[in-house]
Every structure is written in C-alpha cells, then in structure tokens.
Image (cartoon, rainbow, N blue to C red):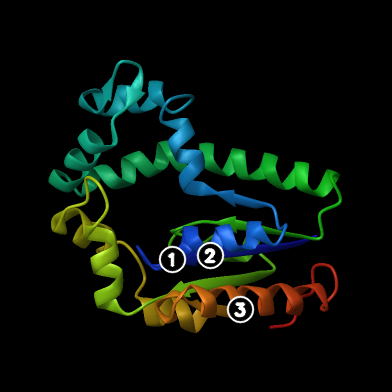
Amino acid sequence: MIVVGLTGTIASGKSTTAEMFADNGIPVFSADEAVHLLYSGRAVAPIAAAFPDAVRDGKVERQRLAAILAADPGAVARLEAIVHPLVREEEEAFRKAAAAAGCEIVVVEIPLLFETDAARRFDRIVVTTAPDDVRRARALARARMTPEVYDLLTARQLSDPEKRRRADFVVDTGAGPDAARAAVGDIIAALASSGPGTPDA
C-alpha cells in the first residue's frame, strides 16, 4: 500500500485537493477532521485540564481556544502535546483498516506534516500551493478567522516555497479547480504505475 502525505500552507487548498483524491476512490484521512471529532470526544478532558476556559458544555470551543493561543504563543506547544498523539492513533487505525481492505493507495492530510517531522512516515508527499494573496483571502473569508490568527498560524509553518521544494508532487490550486483536478489525476496515475510502496515522482 502506498501512503501519501498531503500538506501545504494554510488555505493552500489541502481539503479541496483531498476531496479530489476521494472522488477518484482513494481513501483519505484528514487530521483536521480527526481533531474536530476529538474536540467533542477524547481530547475534551485533557484540554479542559490544561485550558479550562476553552471548554464549554463538554466540548472544546475553537474560538475560545484560538483566543487563548493568540494571547499565549507558548500554549500552542502544550495543546499540540495533547492533540498530536491522539490524532496519530486515529491515523494508525485508518492505515490498518485500509491495509486490511486491500487498498493500493491512501492519502493522509496533515497540515503540519513537515513541522512535526512526519514526512518519514510516508512513501510520497503532495504539497498544495497558491499565491500568497489568494491564500490570505481564502483564510480571512473563513468564519472566526482574524488577521492575527492567520499570522500566528502562518508563522508556525514552513514557507510555501520550502514545502514545494520538499514535495514529490505539487498541486497548484491557484490555477483553478480543473487544473488541480488534472494534477491529482496525473499523481494517481504515477503512483499506480510505480508499484506498491515504491512510487516514482
């Protein structure tokens, strides 16, 4: 089974690209979706212990948590120490289920793939990209996103050029959905023709 890591800077089109892989029948694991579920499940208790003001009615409120992180940069590392191991457990369960089902290719979407030294866990890495102004506009159009939070998140990530340099494949979502969809199709074809676990870029 070929395990592909999908990453990119904030608002570079990761989720849209992940959906394109899924539309082609490729199983996709989203770290962000896993976190969303954890924030109303297993992560609630440890986050409540570390950040009591971030939890209300048995769920982690993202807006409250974002305000805490923006006010205290050191809180980011404490949160990641809680959440990242739980997400990794969910990812491992996904991988095992996919392998048992005989899947030939799977995609794991992780925003901080390079930053968390996760690259070594994947056979190949796909990076999504878009111009700086496009990414900023996309991000600020999201609910609860502010320029301050955007700048905080961007500062924690490797630059777009550096991520592209480390990629095996790049999907330029700034070129439009048709171009991105074609790029995803080309990537799947390249992976499928390369043999299990030894894909050629």
- Judged from the image, the secondary structure of the residue bearing numbered disc 2 is helix
Alpha carbon separation for disc pair 2 and 1: 6 Å
User: Residue drawn 16% across and 53% down?
Assistant: 146
The image shows residue 132 at horizontal and vertical percentages of 28, 77
Residue assigned mark 2: 17
Q: Quadrant of the C terminus?
A: bottom right
Mark before the other along the chain sequence, 3 or 2: 2
User: Residue drawn 21% across and 44% down?
Assistant: 69
Q: Is residue 103 left or right of residue 93?
A: right
Q: Is residue 126 visible?
A: yes
Residue assigned mark 3: 182
Alpha carbon separation for disc pair 1 and 3: 14 Å
Q: Is residue 132 left or right of residue 189?
A: left
- Judged from the image, the secondary structure of the residue bearing numbered disc 1 is loop
Tell me the amino acid under the disc marked 3.
Ala
**Crowd class of label 1 (few under 14; some 14 to 19; many from 20; radius 10 Å):** many
Tell me the amino acid under the disc marked 1.
Gly
The image shows residue 92 at horizontal and vertical percentages of 67, 44
Residue assigned mark 1: 13
Vertical position of residue 165 compared to residue 110: above or below: below
Q: Number of marks in the image?
A: 3
Q: Is residue 167 visible?
A: no
For the residue pair 120 and 31, the one nearer the viewer reads as 31
Numbered disc in front, either 3 or 2: 3
Task: Tell me whether the residue at label 2 lies in contact with that at label 1, contact meaning CB atoms closer than 8 angstroms.
Answer: yes
Q: Quadrant of residue 93?
A: top right
For the residue pair 34 and 136, the one nearer the viewer reads as 136
Mark before the other along the chain sequence, 1 or 3: 1
**Crowd class of label 3 (few under 14; some 14 to 19; many from 20; radius 10 Å):** few
